[in-house]
Image (cartoon, helix red, strand yellow):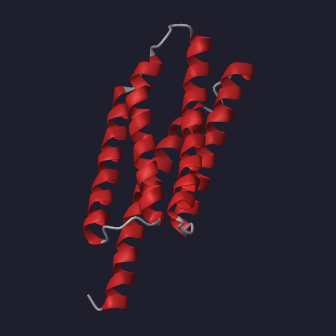
């Protein structure tokens, strides 16, 4: 396991929760943004928790690959399901942020599927760079996306209420 990459993931997770805390302090209500932010943070926490365990679970390379990609693909799928289900349960319309996060989870699922297929059936390393750098780039993008969304929402709130 790449410990440097793992610690970067932890740093990003801290960034997510810092933005989440800032948002909650400013708005303090459950809305579409809250739901997608919460699900994104929890899914990343779950992935970071499972990563070291899954990495060395059996020692059988083929079985480890299956467990790795299927587990992370299932987490991505479950995350989209949770976002949709929580919106229905709270009777909240989807915002552009929640739709964007659902699309990003779907892209991550496709990335998992492509990399799994490439590793299992073709046994090449063509998608390794795309997979490693793509996951990091998506996580950085989402952190920036959340920061901008929080700031934008606060500015809209200030202009609407004269705060």
| Residue 60 percent location from the top left of the image | 56, 7
Tell me the quadrant of the picture where the C terminus can be found.
bottom left
- In this rendering, position of residue 29 left or right of residue 133: left
The part of the image, by quadrant, that contains residue 44 is top left
Answer above or below: position of 46 versus 51: below
The part of the image, by quadrant, that contains residue 37 is bottom left
Q: How many marks?
A: 0
Q: Residue at x 74, y 22 (%)?
A: 122
| Residue 158 percent location from the top left of the image | 32, 85
- In this rendering, position of residue 6 left or right of residue 59: left
Q: Residue at x 44, y 66 (%)?
A: 31
| Residue 86 percent location from the top left of the image | 52, 55
**Which of the pair 43/65 is nearer the observer?**
43
The part of the image, by quadrant, that contains residue 22 is bottom left
Q: Residue furthest top?
A: 59
Q: Residue at x 41, y 44 (%)?
A: 42
**Which of the pair 58/88 is nearer the observer?**
88
Q: Residue at x 50, y 7 (%)?
A: 59
């Amino acid at each position: 396991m790449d410990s440097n990459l793992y610690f970067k993931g932890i740093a990003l997770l801290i960034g997510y929760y810092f933005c989440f805390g800032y948002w909650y302090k400013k708005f303090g209500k459950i809305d579409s943004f809250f739901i997608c932010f919460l699900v994104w943070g929890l899914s990343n926490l779950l992935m970071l928790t499972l990563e070291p365990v899954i990495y060395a679970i059996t020692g059988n390379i083929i079985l480890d690959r299956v467990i790795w990609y299927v587990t992370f693909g299932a987490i991505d799928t479950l995350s989209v399901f949770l976002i949709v289900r929580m919106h229905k349960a709270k009777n909240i319309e989807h915002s552009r942020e929640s739709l964007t996060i659902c699309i990003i989870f779907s892209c991550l699922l496709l990335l998992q599927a492509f990399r799994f297929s490439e590793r299992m059936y073709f046994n090449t390393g063509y998608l390794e760079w795309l997979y490693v750098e793509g996951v990091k780039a998506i996580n950085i993008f989402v952190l920036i996306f959340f920061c901008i969304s929080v700031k934008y929402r606060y500015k809209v709130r200030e202009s609407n209420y004269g705060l």
